Image: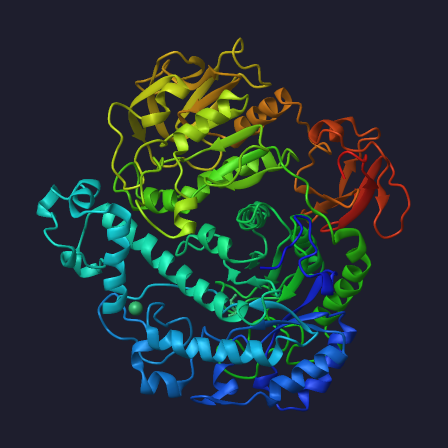
């Protein structure tokens, strides 16, 4: 595998910010290629993702390859200074294959073998499919592996996994055997005595289908796990086919942010670099993208990653095809770069004439070519990224010291659970806590349970519903075994050595098999938190701005600017067992009972928030906790202004993004005291504008949607 430095560049042969798009010259007459390369030069494009769905054009019959068009594309692109992220075309097999061997296609939950149709509908287990995949991938690697334009493998496209074929069903049983070892353990972990669900033989275990009705939740959960695992095994297989020929070329596959279907943490172990497809909605709260970028980059320790798809204008699949107003493309591209992306790439280069994506945004639209507004904005961004490359490449997001714990399996279990409320949203609550830190201009990462937590002072676990005990799987792949952690013990060790832990309600409820911890919630965290929870009340969500209950703070324990605030949705009834109450409910029949507690443990402390407090409380609370660790905002917060920093090579790069449709004024800390505290050892050197190199004034005026970027030297110890 290629060795990539933690601050990049991702590919030393293309050590610039990548600017480009998905490109399908195979959908166009050959002469379009010349025009495209010409336009790419004009647009400052230096990278394309090539051949993503091109299998039928690359292999016209079994083993009969037509590389002519791709040879020409490689040559002309390279002559035009454009690098290639070469795709394996496996997301869409050719018809000759599915006609001859329909078993390469997935079987739906109703038991029907899918006919040849759109894309992403193959069976990840099928040996026949893997044979075909190996042939085309190897052929591509052998043909283009030595081409100087090749900079990255783009493996398949947006993996999606839900095959119910007999091979997948059999593999599922094999997976369960590894996980539980024996059937008695499986029956116990799935609580299979319930509704006479006991399994007397492994063969009785079937992938759950709608016709089964309600099956043990452990089964549902393990099926979700298996689907993801099996696709990850397929990804590994694909990665191996090209790595065998081109071990030095980094590998990625494009992920989809909050996509519920896969556990990307395992996929990240296979890829050399994280990439993802970001399709924000015009007018939406920018926290969505800030959270998603943090979630995605956190999959690989916040190293530089790739924004590999975004639309230059509108999508064709969101509810309304709203165009990005002028300035939004630049704003969102630089937001991604501020969050650690080393690229701004689009879907797609040229808008197709037919089929389902003819109205999807593209750099080259149906009308006006390079005279169109979108092309002009893309070209302007291309020129700017060229100028920013030497400043940004070789840096990664400045390490954060606040992390929010996130785990896809906990999300699955929580949202599957029948109880509390029907509209439970795991990531929604994580994002609310994330937002409270992010709006304070305090750096925050989204952290996976099995990664290294040693860099964090504060860890937030708003919905730690599933608390893994580390007992399962009994056996597994290296990725599965690496993810096997005793989370309660890891949290206790974190607090012990001085960390601040914040646990939210509905945590510590079940183990990794969805079996409830007995003796009071939050199970194995009771001692660390010094409390136990008897039961949880749940009320319908209140109208915006109003709250079903209130919290009154004990200022001797927690001195925040406000003494009371609202809280909503979930209300634990908490008993103190060593912890101190920092706030009590003001309403309902449990008024006066604790709803916020703190417990010292070792050198640190563990907080428990027994309800969902209003955002204003969370902001004050996290700012207070951060200050106690010496963490202060780099720049004082201003509404809708996002502040991001990257670091590396002895410099720090600062991005100030005005997401508001109005002007904003931002104070730049003159002596950067605050910044020094936020990142110990940081420089007090002046900020120099990234474009003009002039020293920034103490106050910066930002036009609507404007982004300003600056850099400064770092002290030698921090670079
Ligand atoms: C996804 C796919 C692309 C394209 C875009 C459209 O991200 O990867 O092939 O379909 O959606 O938004
Ligand atoms: Zn299958």
Q: Is residue 682 left or right of residue 310?
A: right
Seen from this angle, which residue lies furthest top?
Answer: 556
Decide which of 273, 209 is in the foreground and name it: 273
The answer to whether 4 appears left or right of 175 in the picture is right
Q: Residue at x 34, y 35 (%)?
A: 469
Q: Is residue 547 visible?
A: no
Residue at (81, 34) in percent of width and height: 715
Residue 441 position within the rendered picture, expressed as x and y whole percent measured from the top left:
66, 35
> Looking at the image, how many numbered discs can be counted on the residues?
0
List the single residue furthest toward the right: 694
Q: Quadrant of ligand 2?
A: bottom left
- Please name whichever residue, 76 or 351, is drawn nearer the observer in this view of the structure: 76
Measured as percent of width and height from the top left, residue 135 is found at 46, 80
Is residue 316 among the parts visible in the rendering? Answer: yes
Q: Quadrant of the C terminus?
A: top right
Q: How is the image coloured?
A: rainbow
* Quarter of the image where the N terminus is located: bottom right
Q: Is residue 332 above or below residue 195?
A: below
- Residue shown at 81% from the left, 44% from the top: 711
């Amino acid at each position: 595998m290629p060795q990539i430095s933690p601050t990049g560049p991702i590919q030393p042969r293309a050590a610039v910010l990548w600017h480009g798009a998905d490109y399908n010259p195979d959908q166009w007459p050959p002469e379009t290629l010349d025009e495209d390369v010409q336009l790419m030069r004009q647009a400052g494009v230096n990278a394309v993702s090539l051949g993503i769905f091109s299998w039928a054009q690359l292999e016209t019959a079994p083993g009969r390859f037509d590389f002519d068009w791709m040879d020409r594309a490689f040559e002309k692109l390279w002559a035009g200074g454009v690098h290639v992220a070469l795709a394996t075309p496996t997301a869409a097999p050719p018809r000759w294959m599915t006609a001859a061997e329909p078993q390469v296609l997935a079987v739906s939950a109703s038991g029907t073998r899918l006919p040849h149709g759109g894309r992403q509908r193959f069976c990840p287990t099928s040996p026949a499919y893997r044979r075909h995949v190996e042939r085309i991938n190897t052929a591509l690697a052998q043909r283009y592996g030595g081409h100087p334009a090749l900079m990255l493998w783009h493996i398949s496209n947006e993996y999606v996994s839900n095959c119910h074929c007999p091979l997948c069903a059999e593999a599922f049983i094999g997976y369960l055997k590894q996980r539980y070892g024996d059937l008695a353990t499986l029956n116990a972990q799935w609580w299979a005595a319930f509704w006479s669900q006991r399994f007397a033989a492994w063969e009785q275990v079937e992938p759950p289908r709608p016709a089964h009705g309600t099956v043990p939740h452990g089964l549902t959960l393990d099926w979700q796990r298996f689907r993801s695992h099996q696709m990850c095994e397929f990804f590994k297989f694909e990665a191996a086919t090209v790595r065998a020929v081109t071990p030095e070329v980094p590998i990625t596959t494009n992920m989809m942010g909050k996509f519920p279907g896969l556990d990307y943490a395992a996929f990240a172990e296979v890829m050399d670099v994280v990439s993802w497809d970001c399709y924000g909605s015009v007018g939406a709260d920018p926290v969505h993208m800030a959270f998603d970028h943090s979630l995605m980059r956190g999959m690989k320790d916040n190293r530089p990653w790739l924004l590999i798809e975004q639309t230059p204008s509108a999508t064709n699949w969101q509810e309304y095809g709203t165009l990005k107003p002028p300035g939004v493309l630049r704003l969102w591209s630089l937001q991604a770069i501020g969050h650690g992306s080393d690229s701004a790439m689009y879907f797609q280069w040229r808008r197709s004439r037919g089929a389902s994506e003819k109205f999807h945004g593209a750099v080259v639209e149906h009308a006006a070519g390079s005279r169109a507004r979108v092309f002009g904005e893309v070209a302007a961004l291309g020129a700017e990224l060229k100028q920013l490359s030497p400043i940004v490449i070789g840096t990664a997001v400045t390490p954060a010291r606040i992390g929010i714990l996130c785990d896809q399996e906990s999300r699955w279990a929580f949202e599957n659970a029948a109880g509390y409320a029907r509209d439970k949203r795991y990531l929604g609550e994580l994002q609310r806590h994330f937002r409270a830190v992010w709006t304070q201009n305090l750096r925050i990462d989204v952290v996976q349970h099995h990664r290294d937590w040693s860099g964090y002072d504060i860890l937030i676990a708003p919905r730690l519903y599933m608390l893994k005990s580390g007992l399962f799987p009994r056996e597994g792949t290296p990725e599965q075994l690496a993810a096997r952690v005793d989370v309660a013990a890891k949290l206790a060790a974190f607090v012990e050595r001085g960390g601040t832990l914040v646990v939210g309600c509905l945590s510590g409820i079940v183990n990794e098999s969805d079996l409830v911890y007995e003796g009071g919630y939050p199970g194995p965290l009771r001692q660390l938190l010094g409390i136990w929870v008897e039961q949880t009340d749940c009320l319908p969500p209140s109208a915006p701005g109003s709250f079903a209950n209130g919290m009154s703070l004990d200022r001797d324990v927690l001195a925040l600017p406000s003494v009371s605030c609202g809280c909503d949705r979930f209300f634990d009834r908490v008993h103190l067992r060593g912890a101190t109450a920092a706030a009590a409910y003001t309403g309902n029949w449990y008024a006066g009972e604790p709803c916020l507690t703190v417990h010292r443990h070792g050198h640190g402390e563990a907080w428990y928030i027994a309800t969902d407090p209003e955002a204003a409380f969370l902001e004050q609370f996290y700012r207070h906790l951060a200050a106690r660790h010496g963490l202060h905002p780099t720049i004082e917060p201003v509404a809708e202004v996002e502040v991001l920093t990257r670091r590396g090579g002895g410099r720090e790069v600062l991005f100030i993004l005005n997401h508001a449709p109005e002007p904003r004024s931002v104070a730049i800390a003159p002596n950067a005291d605050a910044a020094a505290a936020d990142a110990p050892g940081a420089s007090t050197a002046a900020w120099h504008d990234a474009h003009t190199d002039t020293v920034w004034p103490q106050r910066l005026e930002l036009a609507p949607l404007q982004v300003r970027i600056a850099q400064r030297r770092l002290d030698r110890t921090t670079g």
